[in-house]
Image (cartoon, rainbow, N blue to C red):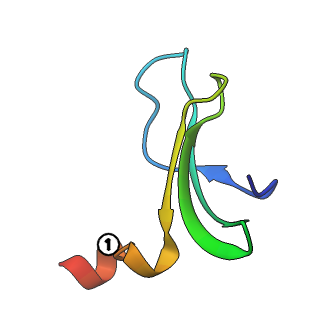
């Protein structure tokens, strides 16, 4: 995942730190959401399939 990723939202408890970033996977851009406090706790989707929050209002 991109090293410049930062946390968004509020922390629910001290055991998780969720970040979101645009990252390249297999040569294509993906929107990735990950809990960086846990191994293998992430999900990704094609950037083209993601909807920006501002556009969804």
Position of 22 compared to 43: left or right? right
The extreme left residue here reads: 57
Residue pushed farthest front? Answer: 26
Of the pair 41 and 18, the residue shown nearer to us: 41
Secondary structure of the residue carrying numbered label 1? helix
Is 19 positioned to the left or the right of 48 in the image? right
User: Hey, which quadrant is residue 41 in on the image?
Assistant: top right
Give the residue drawn at x 45%, y 81%: 48
Relative image position of residue 52 (x, y in whole percent) = 37, 76
Residue 34 at x, y percent in the picture: 56, 41
57 vs 1, nearest the viewer: 1
Work out whether 34 lies above or below 17.
below
State how many labels appear: 1
Q: In this rendering, would 57 be left or right of 55?
A: left
Q: Assess disc 1: are there few (<14), some (14-19) or many (≥20) residues with their C-alpha within 10 Å of its C-alpha.
A: few
- Residue located at (76% from left, 58% from top): 2
* Residue 40 percent location from the top left of the image: 62, 29
Q: Where is the C terminus found, in terms of image quarters?
A: bottom left
At a point 73% along the width and 52% down the height, the residue shown is: 1
Q: Residue at x 70, y 55 (%)?
A: 5
The image quadrant that residue 13 belongs to is: top left
Residue lying furthest right: 3
Q: Position of residue 39 (x, y in %)?
A: 67, 23
Rendered position, 30 above or below 19:
below
Residue assigned mark 1: 53
């Amino acid at each position: 995942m991109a090293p410049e990723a930062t946390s968004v939202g509020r922390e629910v408890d001290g055991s998780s730190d969720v970040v979101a970033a645009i990252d390249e996977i297999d040569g294509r851009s993906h929107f990735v959401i990950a809990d960086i406090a846990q191994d293998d706790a992430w999900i990704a989707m094609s950037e083209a399939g993601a909807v920006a929050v501002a556009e969804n209002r």
